[in-house]
Image: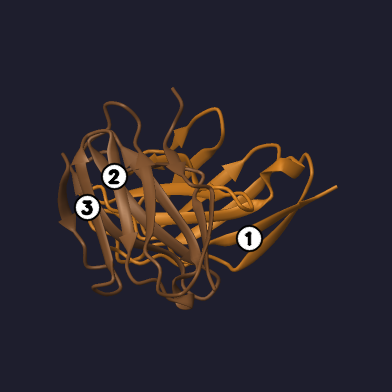
Amino acid sequence: DAGVIQSPRHEVTEMGQEVTLRCKPISGHNSLFWYRQTMMRGLELLIYFNNNVPIDDSGMPEDRFSAKMPNASFSTLKIQPSEPRDSAVYFCASSPHVGQGWHTFGSGTRLTVV
Amino acid sequence: DAKTTQPTSMDCAEGRAANLPCNHSTISGNEYVYWYRQIHSQGPQYIIHGLKNNETNEMASLIITEDRKSSTLILPHATLRDTAVYYCIVNPNAGKSTFGDGTTLTVKP
């Protein structure tokens, strides 16, 4: 099992550009989570999906952020337009099913917006 | 979700047991206690979880008090590679975890 796969590992972009982060959950896992980690705010849950359906997006900071899960094996987190304050490490995690509380995390995408 | 309180930092000598406490006094009956750790620059790693019974796996032991208001994660023989931030999380069975600030454990030679 390759685990949760995120791409890219590092992304540097200019303010105003669109950024797309990608995640492939563990095969067979039905729940997928997007987190953001910064020194100031720690690890924050942005949104999570169950069976490809967004369940709770209350952590999404603003309309510039959007997430999709078109199928069970792929999810994206998009920021458009990006701003310097979006600089953070973004983690994707998956878990087997609702009620299975432990997550397997990916290695994260370090985003720098200049 | 019940909130948790953990010490900001702890030190432990290599080879000794590391005991990391967590208070969760507002925990409700159906909420599990989960522990994760995050080694620098990596994603958090699941360690162990429990409801009311003590649990043990190859990584650690989890001791939950009878009233379930606190728990302790025990790393029986800490190594330098156990240096990390340890998170204690309480959540219902909805699958969503809210991470706090955790405890930074430093294992020293």
Q: CA distance from mark 2 to mark 3?
A: 34 Å
Chain coloured brown in the rendered structure: A
x then y, percent, for residue A114: 54, 74
User: Which sits in the foreground, B54 or B105?
Assistant: B105
Q: Is residue B67 visible?
A: no
Q: Amino acid at mark 2?
A: Ser
- Colour scheme: by chain
Please indicate whether residue B50 sits to the left or right of residue A106 in the image. Answer: left
Residue A100 in which image quadrant: top left
Q: Quadrant of residue A60?
A: bottom left
Q: CA distance from mark 1 to mark 3?
A: 28 Å
How packed is label 2: few (under 14 Cα within 10 Å), some, or many (20 or more)? many
Residues marked 2 and 3 touching at CB (< 8 Å)? no
Residue position marked by numbered label 3 in the rendering: B29
Name the residue carrying label 1.
Answer: B104
Identify the residue shown where x is 50% and y is 29%. Answer: B57
Secondary structure of residue under mark 3? loop
The residue nearer to you, when weighing A32 against B97, is: A32
Q: Amino acid at mark 1?
A: Thr
Chain letter of the orange region? B
Query: Where, quadrant-wise, is the N terminus of chain B in this rendering?
Result: bottom left
Residue A81 versus residue B50: which sits nearer the camera? A81
